[in-house]
């Protein structure tokens, strides 16, 4: 309805506008949705028990073995 | 009765069936048999024949404008029994957590409960030849983890609906099943709130109108949206599309190679491949989608396509000489690798959509453009799950996992898929956010229903067929209860 082979009648334009406003809401919502709360990259494994080296997620006690 | 519409188009007369169903795949056949068993007169329409044909399959061709996806005529089958003619048979049920609100979602989820969705689970198991026992992990004991659980599933033989139900359709006195009968238009009255007929076309170009009290479209996720969008004589933009939602929220299950691993506890891996699902606790805590992560020790790659023989021939020496280079060049793991693959739920995303092109197929239907879209929250789920499962393996001291660099940096440029096509006519109690209501009736149209995985508002991390059949039986029960 919104971007297919052009709607031309006033009625269909109204419908298109209604659809557009929904999509604007959806897009706004999408923009506001927080990304999942993962921490990124190497930092993620750097907690008490784990360390990341070249992508390998290791236990800290692995390093002493 | 089984009839060939190429030969018997003149047999279609003014009779009004109780229900007309377009699409004789798992959904359509399940509904037809269930309604016929309750005394209803059904017409079931299949666009293809009793075997594969290029003429029928050609209607599935379409354009791709999003991330790389399999050719649209390669993932589906267009003849009696539909895509069940080549599925692998893996079945499972959505998790209870899939029915809870999620922080990372744009649109509302299921408007019905899990118990309601699987009310006909026992009958669905019979149709799919599944054991009556609950879905369970392939091995015991359960994992000592709060973050992940062993994947619960069962394998169908797999049931081929053509082989299993052909005789039942042939001998049924209440079902007229037409093959080579292509739905080319859903004819609505001038208000677009009531369907008057299905227009059916055979391969000789003959078109007939077929009437019923109620109509069901069960053509698969891509085609359900396509026929609604094509049926735009009365309402520009297509039937049931006042909200602009028809075709939107197409979802797949993403198959991303998360990395590889080394085993540190041989006993744990003796049973071979293992599947882990993110637990409800992890999903809630991190605000992510559902995901299934598969660990395959000592993989033996299967090569596909015309160059499969050459790929196999060269992969052995290449992997011995330069394993990393060979993996990078071929896109395949080397024999013996321990790989981590995945099946990740996509959020329901309006930008991921099916729309029509100007090109028509031989039946006169406009073909589709699949504009698949991967949301940033999908990527976040992938990276979060990779981190979590890598730590969990290390914590349990069964393996150490190396996370692929593109996953760590969230710069994934290739998404494999499971050919689980979902969404496009999503279910929502609120017509602004969906195409069908909780009874699978198209919002605003009093006698048009949609069946199949196109109505899923969310897809979880489970193969979709069992849910699809259970929902189809629920729809049949609902229709049987109407006057």
Image (cartoon, rainbow, N blue to C red):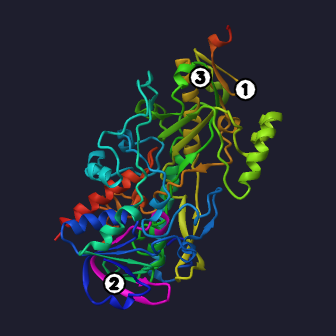
> Within 10 Å of the Cα at label 2, are there few (<14), some (14-19), or many (20+) other Cα atoms?
many
Residue at screen point 18% across, 70% down? B39
Q: Nearer the viewer, residue B22 or B99?
A: B22
| Chain hosting mark 3 | B
Residue B375, above or below B397? below
Residue at screen point 18% across, 65% down? B481
Q: Position of residue A48 (x, y in %)?
A: 58, 14
Instruction: Provide the residue designation for mark 2.
Output: B210
Instruction: Provide the residue designation for mark 1.
Output: A54
Q: Reading the chain from its start, which is encountered first: label 2 or label 3?
A: 2
Q: Confirm whether residue B445 shows in the render.
A: no
Q: Nearer the viewer, mark 3 or mark 1?
A: 3
On the image, which quarter does residue B71 sit in?
bottom right
> Is residue B144 rendered to the left or right of residue B71?
left
| Chain hosting mark 1 | A
Magenta residues span B200-223
> Is residue B322 rendered to the left or right of residue B158?
right
Element at badge 1? loop
Asked if marks 3 and 1 touch (Cβ < 8 Å), the reply is no
> Is residue A26 rendered to the left or right of residue B214?
right
Element at badge 3? strand
Q: Position of residue A44 (x, y in %)?
A: 61, 26
> Within 10 Å of the Cα at label 3, are there few (<14), some (14-19), or many (20+) other Cα atoms?
many
Whole-number angstrom distance, CA of label 3 to CA of label 1: 16 Å
Quarter of the rendering occupied by the N terminus of chain B: bottom left
Whole-number angstrom distance, CA of label 2 to CA of label 3: 61 Å
Q: Position of residue B304 (x, y in %)?
A: 66, 53
Instruction: Provide the residue designation for mark 3.
Output: B399
On the image, which quarter does residue B255 sit in?
top right
């Amino acid at each position: 309805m919104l971007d297919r082979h052009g709607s031309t009648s006033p009625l269909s334009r109204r419908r298109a506008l209604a659809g557009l406003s929904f999509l604007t809401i959806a897009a706004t919502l999408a923009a506001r949705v927080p990304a999942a709360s993962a921490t990124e990259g190497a930092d993620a494994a750097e907690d008490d028990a784990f360390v990341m080296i070249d992508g390998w997620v290791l236990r800290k006690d692995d390093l002493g073995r | 009765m089984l009839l060939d519409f190429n030969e018997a188009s003149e047999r279609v007369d003014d009779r009004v069936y109780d229900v007309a169903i377009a699409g004789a795949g798992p959904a359509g056949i399940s509904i037809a048999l269930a309604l016929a068993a309750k005394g209803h007169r059904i017409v079931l329409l299949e666009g293809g024949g009793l075997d594969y044909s290029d003429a029928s399959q050609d209607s599935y061709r379409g354009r791709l404008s999003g991330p790389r996806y399999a050719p649209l005529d390669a993932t589906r089958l267009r003849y009696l029994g539909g895509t069940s003619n080549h599925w692998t048979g893996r079945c499972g049920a959505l998790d209870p957590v899939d029915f809870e609100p999620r922080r990372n979602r744009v649109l509302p989820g299921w408007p019905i409960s899990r118990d309601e969705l699987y009310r006909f689970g026992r009958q669905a198991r019979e149709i799919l030849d599944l054991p009556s026992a609950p879905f369970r992990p392939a091995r015991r004991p359960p994992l000592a983890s709060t973050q992940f659980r062993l994947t619960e599933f069962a394998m169908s033989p797999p049931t081929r609906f053509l082989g299993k139900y052909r005789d039942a359709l042939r001998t049924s006195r209440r079902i007229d099943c037409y093959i080579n009968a292509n739905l080319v238009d859903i004819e609505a009255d001038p208000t677009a709130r009531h369907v008057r007929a299905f227009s059916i076309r055979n391969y000789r170009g003959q078109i007939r109108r077929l009437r019923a009290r109620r109509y069901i479209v069960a053509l698969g996720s891509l085609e359900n949206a396509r026929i609604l969008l094509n049926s735009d004589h009365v309402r520009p933009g297509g039937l049931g599309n006042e909200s602009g939602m028809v075709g939107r929220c197409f979802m797949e299950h993403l198959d991303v190679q998360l990395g590889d691993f080394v085993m540190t506890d041989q006993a744990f891996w003796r049973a071979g491949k293992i599947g882990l699902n993110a637990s409800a606790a992890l999903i809630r805590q991190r605000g992510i989608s559902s995901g299934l992560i598969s660990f395959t020790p000592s993989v033996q790659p299967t090569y596909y396509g015309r160059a499969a023989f050459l790929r196999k021939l060269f992969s052995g020496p290449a992997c011995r000489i330069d394993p990393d280079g060979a993996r990078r060049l071929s896109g395949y793991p080397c024999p013996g690798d321990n790989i981590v693959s995945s099946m990740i739920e996509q959020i329901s995303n309006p930008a991921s959509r099916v729309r029509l092109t100007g090109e028509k197929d031989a039946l006169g239907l406009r073909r589709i453009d699949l504009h698949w879209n991967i949301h940033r929250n999908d990527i976040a789920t992938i990276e979060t799950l990779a981190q979590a499962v890598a730590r969990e393996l290390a914590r349990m001291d069964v393996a150490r996992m190396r996370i692929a660099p593109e996953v760590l940096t969230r710069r994934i440029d290739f998404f494999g898929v499971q050919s689980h096509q979902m969404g496009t006519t999503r279910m929502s109690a609120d017509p602004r956010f969906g195409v069908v209501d909780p009874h699978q009736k198209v919002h605003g149209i009093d006698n048009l229903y949609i069946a199949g995985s196109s109505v899923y508002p969310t897809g979880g991390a489970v193969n979709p067929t069992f849910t699809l059949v259970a929902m189809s039986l629920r729809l049949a029960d609902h229709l049987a209860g109407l006057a």
